[in-house]
Amino acid sequence: MAEIRFVLNGKEETYTGSLSDRLLDVLRDVYRCTSVKCGCKEGECGACSVLIDGTLYNSCCVAMGAVEGSSIVTMESFRETKRFEALEKAFGELSAVQCGFCIPGMVLAAEALLSKNPHPTEDEIRDGLSGNLCRCTGYNAIVNAVNNAAKEGNGLW
């Protein structure tokens, strides 16, 4: 057993458990971050995407030992930001959401992209979202929503 200290959604946390415990499981089971979805458990679908120190990761592939001293953001806190509001508006207006299973990961992937590249091309958006799978809407509406959020975001990124 180890104590792992990190910041989760702006709050300092200490997790006591194995260094090899999977971040996905800890976020869902211990911290009740239900926006982090378990899709494939192999890093292929992006449903479990989180931001660790501002970089997008599939939490199913991250061991708890790797997050010592890190800052982790899930949709539970990101949805309280102005940037989320811009993405939410664009996703809603362009019908980029159907079942919603992939959307937390898609939105965090969009945030990761836009925070590094506030004016991406369509190809850059597609590349930025490429680690996230959607089985409902297809990708055109999602790409258009991210593009719209970037343009309409009034300098948020």
Image: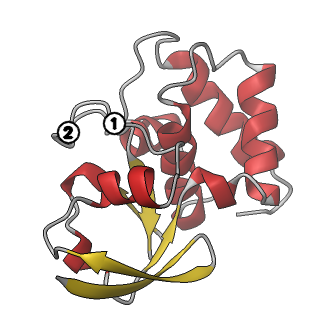
Q: Are marks 2 and 1 in contact (CB under 8 Å)?
A: yes
| Coordinates of residue 111 in the picture (x, y in percent) | 58, 54
Looking at the image, which residue is at 42% across and 34% down?
126
Callout 1: SS: loop
- Measuring from the top left, give residue 130's x and y in whole percent: 34, 36
Q: Quadrant of the N terminus?
A: bottom left
Residue denoted by label 1: 38
Figure check: 62 above or below 17: above
Q: Residues within 10 Å of mark 1 (few under 14, many from 20)?
A: many
In this orientation, which residue lies closer to the viewer: 37 or 156?
37
> What amino acid is labelled 1 in the image?
Cys
Which quadrant, please, contains the C terminus?
bottom right
x, y (%) of residue 96? Answer: 64, 20
- Which residue does the image show at 31% across and 85% down from the upper left? 4
Q: What number is the disc on residue 41?
A: 2
Residue 14's spot in the image, x, y percent? 42, 84
Residue 132 sits in which quadrant?
A: top left
